[in-house]
């Protein structure tokens, strides 16, 4: 009885009080440690698998408080260009913490080690500049971390391309048609694996001739239409199209401007899109391996001849495909 008594003293003052109550013949309202969960400091909520809170006393003055988060920022290669990307790691954080940035497009943070990480694209529309933004971590409504970071976006030249197409083909490029496509594409990119599904650099998805580079400034029938979001690779109709890396198929259907299309989620908000296919050989929800056959080259949708339009994007922001062909999209060291 004494031994139990001392154990209880060591584990919890509250339990001692209720034990005293029990010895005096006053049963506690329940034997599950009433009130103890509320006594665990709210600012330090443990994940379920280490939830000792039920039998844990309130944090004593000598106990360490959780360490403050720190920010790591890094990028692939020697510099960030328009169409490039970088990654952010914030940690350690508590499971209930919220992280936010002042970036125009909120990065998708996913758990990594004892913190969170996100891939952050730099749009090809961004001019060369010092990109300055703020990263903050909130714990139970209180700001526990705030840092302003600056990323140098180096200049990059993009070519200009003039396309002449028939009025009939031109007529597919309406706002309504783009919006119809976008509805499905946005839905497809709304879900992403928390962990990278890739293992190394990405694979060129088709063998062929490169006809239009990423980011090219395009004119169709002398009208500026914006930028070319991916890489065009010309190849005969029916040529095999492979998954550039492992992932999950999030879209596999015919769209109006993009033609028959496949979108693969590689995790961490990184997607590859395969457009203008002649045949789609996968279904939504399929898990694919790097190099797996997913379709055949075609000329469906707004297309002037058989080719694969291949886009690599972080969320909806296209990035330079050559970056992930040269090196894995995220390196932790
Ligand atoms: Zn294209």
Image: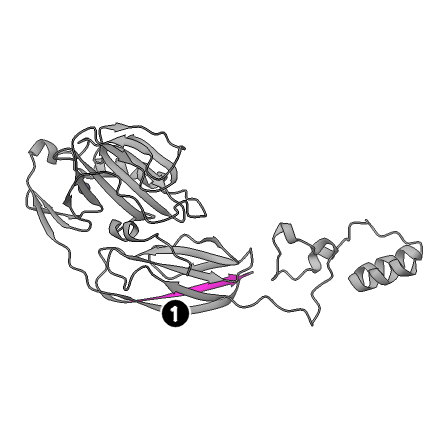
Instruction: Residue at 65%, 62% (x, y): give it.
Output: 41
Q: Quadrant of the C terminus?
A: bottom left
Q: Position of residue 181 (x, y in %)?
A: 26, 36
**Residues in magenta, as a range:** 131-139
Instruction: Residue at 85%, 52% (x, y): give it.
Output: 28
Instruction: Residue at 21%, 40% (x, y): give it.
Output: 309
Q: In the image, 235: left or right of 92?
A: left
Q: In the image, 124: left or right of 102?
A: left
Q: Position of residue 290 (x, y in %)?
A: 35, 40
Establish if 206 lies above or below 121: above
The reply to whether residue 259 is visible in this rendering is no
Q: Position of residue 153 (x, y in %)?
A: 26, 64
Q: Position of residue 240 (x, y in %)?
A: 25, 32
Q: State ligand 1's quadrant.
A: top left
* Residue behind mark 1: 148
Q: In the image, 69: left or right of 65?
A: left
The front one of 118 and 203 is: 203
The front one of 330 and 27 is: 330
Q: Quadrant of residue 243 in the image?
A: top left
* Residue 133 is one of the magenta-drawn residues: yes
Q: Quadrant of residue 308 in the image?
A: top left
**Element marked by disc 1:** strand
* Residue 149 is one of the magenta-drawn residues: no
Please name the predominant secondary structure of the magenta segment in the image. strand
**Total numbered labels:** 1
């Amino acid at each position: 009885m004494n031994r139990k008594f001392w154990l209880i003293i060591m584990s919890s003052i509250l339990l001692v009080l209720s034990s005293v109550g029990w010895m005096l013949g006053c049963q506690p309202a329940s034997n599950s440690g009433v009130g103890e969960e509320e006594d665990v400091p709210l600012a330090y909520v443990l994940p379920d698998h280490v939830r000792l809170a039920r039998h844990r006393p309130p944090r004593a003055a000598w106990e360490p408080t959780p360490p403050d988060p720190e920010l790591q920022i890094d990028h692939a290669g020697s510099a960030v260009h328009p169409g490039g990307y970088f990654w952010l790691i914030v940690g350690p954080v508590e499971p209930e913490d919220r992280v936010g940035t002042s970036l125009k497009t909120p990065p998708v943070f996913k758990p990594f080690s004892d913190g969170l990480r996100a891939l952050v694209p730099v749009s090809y529309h961004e001019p060369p500049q010092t990109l300055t933004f703020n990263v903050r971590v909130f714990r139970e409504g209180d700001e526990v971390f705030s840092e302003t970071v600056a990323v140098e976006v180096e200049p990059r030249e993009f070519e200009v391309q003039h396309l002449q197409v028939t009025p009939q083909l031109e007529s597919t490029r309406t706002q309504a048609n783009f919006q119809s496509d976008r509805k499905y594409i946005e839905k497809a990119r709304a879900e992403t694996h928390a962990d990278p599904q890739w293992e190394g650099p990405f694979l060129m998805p088709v063998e062929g001739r490169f006809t239009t580079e990423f980011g090219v400034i395009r004119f169709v029938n002398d009208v500026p239409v914006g930028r070319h979001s991916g890489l065009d690779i010309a190849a005969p109709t029916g040529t095999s199209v492979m998954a550039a890396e492992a992932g999950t198929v999030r879209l596999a259907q015919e769209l109006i401007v993009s033609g028959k299309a496949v979108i693969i989620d590689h995790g961490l908000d990184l997607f590859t899109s395969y457009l203008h296919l002649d045949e789609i050989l996968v279904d939504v929800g399929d898990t694919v391996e790097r190099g797996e056959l997913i379709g055949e080259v075609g000329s469906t949708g707004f297309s002037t001849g058989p080719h694969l339009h291949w886009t690599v994007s972080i969320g909806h922001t296209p990035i330079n495909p050559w970056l992930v062909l040269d090196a894995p999209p995220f390196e932790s060291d």
